[in-house]
Image (cartoon, rainbow, N blue to C red):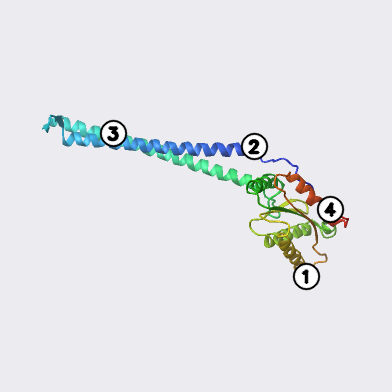
């Protein structure tokens, strides 16, 4: 297993476009408020116009309101003006609302597509596990969380034994099948809070938040039993086997040291070497 040293390769333009779309959606929300303000102002104007028709002339005196009659010849013009104002305002507001809704739908579709493309770039298509790119994003987050709250964090690295021989003897399709079956076992054994990665080839990594090395022994036993059970039920001409290494993150240390430690331990077990500390 090689340590994580590949830089994040998600296209910067994709992330920048996602931020831009979110800003545009927020701007559309502010335009919604502007339209509602126009509607409120229109209601006030129409209310004033109706009051002017019902009470044509209001003249305030010291203690009472004096009502004078308006000439009947002005009423048709007033009604026509109010109706025209209502129609033009409704046409304008309806057009603006339709435009805003269409723009919002377009932006949301683009944002969803953008997020799907970004997610696809972080998922291994064969095993449907997070890939090496995802490691560069998620592991630093878990390390920052462990540093912030002082929680345990354990990293487990695994490498399938004899994988190249399986590919050579039975073909790449059988090799892919082994990888898929092994990833299914990992998903079954480890809890939902644990993050399982496929680094590439036959190399896998599991990050276990809030877990110490002693606590991680239980899922390792379940994993060993699950592999043994798979070998009994598969009736293959080969057996699934793995080498593994485990190490805990120490608060404030460099996560690269942990990755080197699990790499070293796995290599020692794979080649039956005496541990050197």
Say if 216 sits above or below 88 in the image. below
Quarter of the figure with residue 76: top left
Name the residue that disc number 3 marks.
85
Residue at 52% across, 43% down: 108
Name the residue that disc number 2 marks.
12
Question: Depth-wise, is mark 2 or mark 4 nearer the camera?
Answer: 4
Q: For residue 51, which numbered disc appears in the image?
A: none
The alpha-carbon separation of the residues under discs 3 and 4 comes to 81 Å
Name the residue that disc number 4 marks.
267
Tell me if 92 is positioned left or right of 196 in this view.
left
Question: Depth-wise, is mark 2 or mark 3 nearer the camera?
Answer: 2
Lower sequence index among marks 3 and 1: 3
The alpha-carbon separation of the residues under discs 2 and 4 comes to 36 Å
> Where does the image place residue 208, in percent across and percent down from the top left?
69, 54
Structural crowding at the residue carrying mark 3, measured as other residues with C-alpha within 10 Å and reported as few (<14), some (14–19) or many (≥20) = some
- Label 2's element? helix
Lower sequence index among marks 2 and 4: 2
Lower sequence index among marks 2 and 1: 2
- Label 3's element? helix
Lower sequence index among marks 4 and 1: 1
């Amino acid at each position: 297993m090689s340590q994580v040293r590949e830089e994040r390769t998600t296209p910067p333009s994709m992330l920048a476009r996602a931020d831009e779309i979110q800003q545009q959606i927020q701007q559309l929300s502010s335009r919604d408020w502007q339209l509602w303000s126009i509607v409120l102002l229109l209601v006030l104007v129409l209310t004033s116009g109706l009051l002017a028709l019902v009470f044509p002339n209001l003249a305030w005196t010291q203690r009472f309101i004096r009502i004078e009659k308006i000439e009947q010849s002005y009423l048709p013009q007033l009604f026509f003006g109010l109706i025209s104002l209502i129609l033009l305002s409704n046409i304008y507001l309806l057009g603006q609302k339709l435009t805003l809704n269409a723009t919002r739908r377009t932006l949301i579709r683009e944002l969803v597509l953008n997020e799907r493309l970004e997610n696809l770039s972080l998922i291994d298509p064969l095993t449907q596990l997070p890939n090496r790119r995802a490691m560069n994003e998620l592991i630093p987050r878990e390390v920052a969380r462990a540093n912030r709250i002082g929680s345990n964090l354990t990293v487990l690295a695994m490498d399938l034994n004899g994988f190249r021989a399986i590919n050579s003897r039975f073909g790449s399709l059988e090799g892919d099948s082994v990888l898929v079956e092994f990833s299914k076992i990992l998903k079954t054994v480890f809890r939902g809070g644990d993050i399982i990665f496929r680094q590439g080839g036959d190399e896998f990594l599991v990050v276990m938040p809030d877990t110490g090395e002693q606590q991680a022994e239980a899922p390792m036993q379940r994993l060993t039993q699950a592999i043994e059970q798979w070998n009994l039920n598969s009736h293959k001409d080969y057996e699934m086997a793995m080498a593994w290494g485990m190490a805990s993150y120490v608060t404030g240390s460099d996560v690269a040291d942990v990755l080197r430690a699990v790499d070293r331990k796995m290599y020692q077990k794979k080649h039956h070497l005496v541990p050197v500390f």
